[in-house]
Amino acid sequence: MQREVASAGGAPASDADPVPRRRFSGRVLLPAAALAVMLAAIFVLQPRAMSYNGMRLLLGFSLPLMFAAMAQMCVIAASDIDLGLGTYIGLVNSLSALLLADRPLLGVLSLVGCVLAYAGMGAFIEARRLPSIVVTLGASFVWLGLALLVLPTPGGASPAWLSALVRLKPPLVPLSIVVAVLLALVGHWLFMRSSYGVVLRGIGSTPQAVRRAGWSLLTARTVLYGLAGVFGLIAGLVLTGLNTTGDANFGAPYTLLSISAVIVGGGEFFGGIVAPVGAVIGAFIMLLTGSLLSFMDVSTDWQLSVQGAILILVLGTRAFRRRRA
Amino acid sequence: MRIAPGTLLATALGLAIISAASVGHADGTGVATGDTSGKKIALSNSYAGNSWRQQMLKTWDRATADAIKDKVIKAAKVVNANASAPEQANHIESLIVEGWDAIVINAASPTALNGVIQEACDQHIVVVVFDGLATAPCAYKVAYDYTAMGKMEADFAIKKLGGKGNVLEVRGIAGVSVDDDIHKGLVDTFATAPGIKVVGSVYGNWTQTIAQKEVASVLPSLPPVNMVVTQGGDGWGTFQAFKAAGRPTPTIVFGNRQDELKLWSDLLKADPGYDTFSASSAPGCASVAFWVAQQVLAGKKVPNTIYLPLPRIEQADLESWLKVMPDGAVATPVYSQAWTADLIDANAAGKPLPPSPVAKLGDM
């Protein structure tokens, strides 16, 4: 533990440190192996899933979840937690379905406003030294309230370009897999390779060291929450495209799903320890539990329990490995 | 001009398939008898956590188990989401991959599943939505006409009170379309009877305890109430509130919950002139949705929206209903294939809907 804190918190130069690189790959290997086993099981149980169309359908709803996981990871990188992400996604879903098709300018402005509000929330948390769990929980009611205000009953329509975009059928590989690879690469570069990424992870582990090295904590947390706002925005837009309409309540489950995806994918609640590639893999794992149970003819009433069990198993395994290390 | 033998064979096969999908009568009415013995029908249910939904699942199981036993269909299954629309959307995509021939859906959101429903229709899967409806145009909708329920209650009130009296309205959950529709039916009908005054309106959330609390809180401010119109699940609580306030018991239009019917039966024993009725949606609508899906697969022409009659219980039937209802149940029959075919025909022809049958022992 001490070693991780030191490596993440050391000045930007520590990017060359071999220790976090090794830890990182170990973090991602476990969820990657788990996902491979799940996919193998799905293919054995339901050979139809192995086709292009099968994969496209099975992974259709991975798009919003992987962006939600990436958004949540940005917040978790600061050792914070975002309990408002799901309703924020619902707000974006509602706003984009209501405005984007008919009044594009107003729609874009309102969505930019959403991202700014998210960045502002990060600044507020840093400036007033408030616990994120309380601020984001409070914000979750604000997002939901705003969403219900603009769209009291489900409705609206997705702009045609958005629906077409999320239903794109690239040759050979379904869209969700293409996007997942791109998102994982972008996330990996942003957090693991860029020099500012070390600062972003650093405020989650040893903020004093980051400040002493001359970086502004206020800026860093604002950037992290702003990034979360952007990824959450994309998740909401993708949902609008997939569902073709808006529903203020639709996004809510994404709060807990995104947290689970980050943790299952190798992230930790504290210490600025996150794995962008793992978060994307974690999103797939969370998504496929339902399909796997369905193919096994196990009642989906077990889905929540199984997702919870996976989470406990992952955390348990990690604690066990840490003790042996 | 030459015609390839393959084309002829294909045409012959096509004709054979079309003739196999014949219907009971020459004019297309009655039960369609096309062969569906190899078909599989799945139910995607948005939520299973209350007694109404549990009963709904039970009627689904009863209807499908019989259909499988009689070789009408090959397989059925149920997938429950935890009141989460994304989860349900994902379940439906899995069902598409699994190759189910028809998917019956009680939707978590009226709009959010439209994308996946369209996806299912594109794969030539029959989609039937019921209870929690979705607006996707390609889905068959099995719906209650809740405006008619409001009208039915208001008509009864106007007749019973002779066009003059005070009415208390107990509503459902604010913002839910079912509540809006019932309310609209009531308001529109009461508008034709100026002597009827709606002296109060509370939200009982279709829950006895909440209805009791809400009614109790407005009662002190109300003039004498002659009649209470409810939406079901709230009649027993309403009565308790009147009793606790020491007010005379008004005529309450009940819902079809067992506790409400039991109370009505007790009130009748105390006062044989206590004249009312009860109505609410039946969990058995799942069995109607199932048979609609089966009939579409069997080749029957089915209108896009099928309205269901709300089971209405009159004093004459009260005791026979109570006899077959376990404690805590909601009155519902398990609807049959023949009844569903009649319902589809009535909807297609714009004729009055067949009345909901009385339940048999074991339906609930």
Image (cartoon, helix red, strand yellow):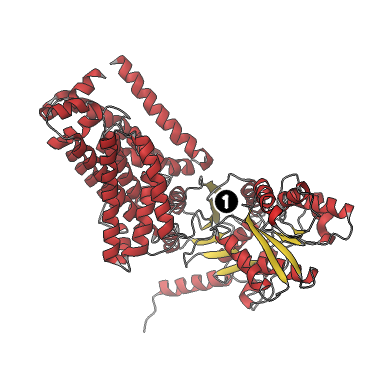
Depth check: B236 or B78 in front? B236
Depth check: B97 or B182 in front? B182
Q: Quadrant of residue A103?
A: bottom left
Instruction: Classify B283 as above or below A304.
Output: below
Visible residue check, residue A165 = no
Where is residue B315? Give x, y as percent: 83, 60
Q: Chain of mark 1?
A: B
Q: Quadrant of residue B281?
A: bottom right
Depth check: B355 or B66 in front? B355
On screen, residue B28 versus residue A317, left or right, reads right
Depth check: B336 or B3 in front? B336
Q: Residue at x 22, y 25 (%)?
A: A206
Instruction: Classify A242 as above or below A223.
Output: below
Instruction: Classify A121 as above or below A56.
Output: above
Bin the neighbour count of mark 1 within 10 Å (Cα to Cα): few under 14, some 14-19, many 20 and up: many
Q: Which image quarter is the C terminus of chain A in?
A: top left
Amino acid found under the numbered disc labelled 1: Ala
Residue at the top extreme?
Answer: A324
Q: Which image quarter is the N terminus of chain A in?
A: top left
Where is residue A5? Give x, y as percent: 22, 23
Q: Quadrant of residue B321?
A: bottom right
Circle 1 SS class: strand
On screen, residue A301 versus residue B316, left or right, reads left
Visible residue check, residue B29 = yes
Where is residue B169? Give x, y as percent: 67, 60
Where is residue B286? Give x, y as percent: 62, 56
On screen, residue A41 versus residue B304, left or right, reads left
The number of numbered badges drawn on the structure is 1
Q: Which residue is mark 1?
A: B76
